[in-house]
Image: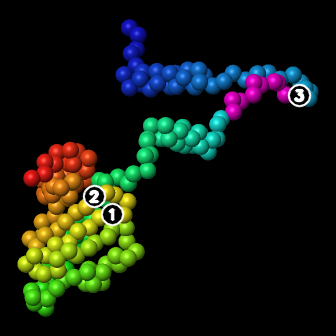
Amino acid sequence: MPKVLPRYILISILESVAMARKSRETERPRRRSKRNAETPASQTPPKKKRSPVVTFVAVVVVVVIIWATLIKDDGKVPIGKIAPDIVAELDKLYMFCGVYWMEKGGHLLCGQDLADKLRDSKNADIKVTVIDAVAKDFSAIAKHIAAPMVFRVDDDGEVFIKAKECEINIRSLDIHELDLEELESQCKPK
């Protein structure tokens, strides 16, 4: 009866044979060179790889071309970016005047001179004008120099946008996606 090798020995022998076979298959066969040959055996020239800088520049050029053809620049300032800034200026003025009246007295005026001190309105893109400086009838308007829209804050701190002869409370609007032409078309003067 033939002697049987233990299982773990058989597995180790098979693994070593498989490893040897695998290494022979992955190695490149060596070419024999002639003795005393002065020129090495000719090899195919390696494929030139493109520089990552060239690839990056090519991608940037393609993106710029696509951007230039797809994006229309009509010279208008996007209202969705300007409107929140205008509303913020009116809110800031209203809160400043509220604190001023609480500290100094509601009978004093919170006029244009205080509004100009609050912010440097002479150099800003947003022009704020106080219409009525009395606490019980306070009113101020603000507009951006590059946009046709006008906002107004009243004595309750409510901010409205003017569209033709209508005033619409901005609470009912998404100020970031404001469409002034649509608001004007919906305006029905009284």
Q: Residue 77 vs residue 44: left or right?
A: left
To which residue does mark 3 refer?
Answer: 39
Q: Residues within 10 Å of mark 2 (few under 14, many from 20)?
A: some
Callout 1 secondary element: strand
Taking 26 as reference, is 171 above or below it?
Answer: below
Taking 82 as reference, is 99 above or below it?
Answer: below
Q: Residues within 10 Å of mark 3 (few under 14, many from 20)?
A: few
The amino acid pointed to by label 2 is Met
Q: Residues within 10 Å of mark 1 (few under 14, many from 20)?
A: many
Residue bounds of the magenta highlight: 40-48
Q: CA distance from mark 3 to mark 1?
A: 78 Å
Viewer-proximal residue among 4 and 46: 46
To which residue does mark 2 refer?
Answer: 149
Q: Residue 70 vs residue 157: left or right?
A: right
Q: CA distance from mark 2 to mark 1?
A: 7 Å
Which sits earlier in the primary sequence, circle 2 or circle 1? Answer: 1
Residue 90 point in image, percent of width and height: 22, 70
Taking 101 as reference, is 24 above or below it?
Answer: above
Identify the mark at residue 144; answer none if there is no mark: 1
The amino acid pointed to by label 3 is Thr
Corner quadrant of residue 39: top right
Callout 3 secondary element: loop
Say which residue appears at 46% left-offset and 24% top-offset. Answer: 15
